[in-house]
Amino acid sequence: MRQKTSPPASEKIAQAKLLYDAGAPIAQITALLGVSAKQFLAFREKNDWPKRVPVCPRKSGPAKSAPAPVDPDALIPKLEDAVAREFARVETALEKQAPKTIEASARALATLVKTLAELKRMRREADETKEDATRPDDDRADEPPRELAELRAELARRLERLRGGGPPG
């Protein structure tokens, strides 16, 4: 007679979900949850986890066109999810004490965090540029002065702004 296995803890399920989404081998996920591959597939279907996309495209399929450009605002949540998945991989590697996996995960995590920070910085700069463009007095401020005294005064104001000591405008 076969014993019924107890359901895995919610923390392990969350970690398994991250591993599954990251493309970890099913054997690794089943070992984490303590279930067989067949039980895992039933569990995946029961909990509506999406099927994974094959890593290698099929040769007989139709030719794909170039991918559409990705919205930077949509990339940030995806990168944050990737960072969370990579943290789950690191935790799993630490439990198993697999140094090669830990090193690879650390490199991937560092790259993801740098990319995420750069993307957020670029979005922040783009937002600042949009704000600067919508200011009503910007057009007038960029016009060249008509007299030499006015030119000197404008140059002095701009130098003060660059040094951070003077009032804007």
Image: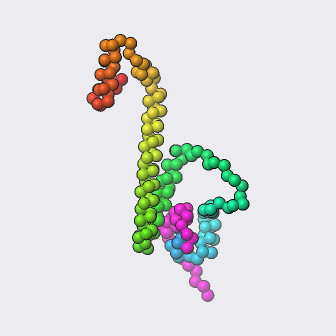
Pick the quarter of the image with the C terminus. top left
Q: Residue furthest top?
A: 147
- Quarter of the figure that contains the N terminus: bottom right
Q: Residue sitting at 33 percent across and 13 percent down?
A: 148
What residue appears at the point 54 percent right and 47 percent down from the top-left corner? Answer: 74
Looking at the picture, the colour scheme in use is rainbow
127 sits to left or right of 163 = right
Decide: is 97 above or below 49. Answer: below
Instruction: Check the image and report above or below for 62 versus 95.
Output: above
Is the residue 61 above or below the residue 143 in the image? Answer: below
Q: Is residue 135 visible?
A: yes
Q: Is residue 41 left or right of residue 113?
A: right
Q: Nearer the viewer, residue 69 or 36?
A: 69
Q: Residue furthest bottom?
A: 1
| Numbered-mark total | 0
The percent position of residue 76, horizontal first and vertical second, equals 49, 49
Q: Which residues are magenta?
A: 1-27
Viewer can see residue 33: no
Outermost residue toward the left in this view: 165
Rendering coords of residue 104 (x, y %): 44, 64
User: Residue 45, how many percent across, how many down?
Assistant: 64, 66
Does residue 129 lie above or below 115 as drawn? above
Q: Is residue 126 left or right of residue 21?
A: left
Q: Nearer the viewer, residue 43 or 50?
A: 50
State the residue at coordinates (52%, 72%): 28
Q: Is residue 7 magenta?
A: yes
Question: Where in the figure is residue 141, as x and y percent of width and height?
Answer: 40, 21
**Per the image, is 32 magenta?**
no
Q: Residue at 44% across / 55% down in the picture?
A: 111
